[in-house]
Amino acid sequence: MNGPDGLMLVTVKFLASYAEQVGEDEVDLMLPPSSTVADLLDQLRQRFPRWGKMVDQPLVARNLEYVRPEQVLEDGDEVAFFPPVSGG
Amino acid sequence: MSVRVEIGKARLDPGRVLSSLACPADGAVNLFLGVVRDHHQSRRVLRLEYHAYGAMAKQKMQQIADEVTERFGATSVVLLHRLGTLEIGDVSVLVAVATAHRAESFTACRHAIERIKSEVPIWKKEHFEDGVAWVEGCRPGAPDPSPI
C-alpha cells in the first residue's frame, strides 16, 4: 500500500565493494509510483555521486531475484545493488 | 532424495559430508572442493574474506540444488559455502552429488559449481602483503573468466 502522498517506500541494499564506496549498506527511499530500477539507480547516482561515478552496470536484485533496469518497483520492495559475484 | 544447502562460518568437513551422503540406490558420488589458494596471478595471497548477501545467496543455492536434482536425477545434493576469513588451504565451497551412474554425477557437480560461481551473491576480498582488494567476478550468464 502506498503512502498518503502516493509515494512508495523502497529499501535499498548495497553489498560488498558498493557498501564501502557508498559508506552505507542500507537506505530507505521514497519513489513515485511506477518507478523502475533504472529510475531508482538515477536517484542513487545523484545521492551518492562518488559511487555513481565508479559504478558501471551494477547487478540488481528485487526481493532476492535478479531483475533488469526496466523492472517496475512496488511499495515495500527490497532492491539490492552489487558488483559481479566472485564466490567459490 | 535429499538436499542440503548451507552458508555460514563453520569449517567445512568433506569426510563427514561424504559419509552422510550415499544411499543404496547410488552408484556414484562426486565431490568438488574449492580451496583457498596462496596466489592471485603473481601476487602472494595471505588469506581471503568472504561476504554474502545472505538471504539471496541461500535462495539461489537452494534453486541450484533443486535444479540439479530435477535435471540430472541426483538422489542427494549438498551445497555448502563458507563465509568470513579463510586461511590458505581452507575449503571455501563444497559440492557433493550422488547419482545412480558416474556420468550424471560429474555433469551435475560441474553444473552446480559453475552456477554457484556465476549467480550466487557472494564476494571474496583478497588480503595481500601490501593491501586488500575485492575480486571482480562474473555476471550471471557470462562465462567464467578464471582458468579452471
Image: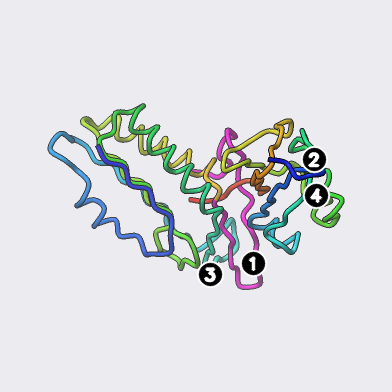
* Amino acid, disc 2: Gly
Camera-side mark, 2 or 3: 2
On the image, numbered disc 4 is attached to which residue?
A44
Residue B147: % across, % down:
52, 44
Helix, strand or loop at mark 4: helix
* Amino acid, disc 4: Leu
**Horizontal side of residue B84 vs A10, given as left or right:** left
Residue B131: % across, % down:
66, 70
Q: Is residue A31 above or below residue A69?
A: below
Checking the image for residue B46, the label placed there is 3
Magenta-drawn segment: B122-148
Camera-side mark, 2 or 4: 2
Q: CA distance from mark 2 to mark 3?
A: 52 Å
Helix, strand or loop at mark 2: loop
Could you tell me which residue is drawn at 75 percent across and 45 percent down?
A3
On the image, numbered disc 1 is attached to which residue?
B132
Q: CA distance from mark 1 to mark 4?
A: 26 Å
Helix, strand or loop at mark 3: strand
Could you tell me which residue is drawn at 43 percent across and 42 percent down?
B113
Q: CA distance from mark 4 to mark 3?
A: 35 Å
Q: CA distance from mark 2 to mark 4?
A: 20 Å
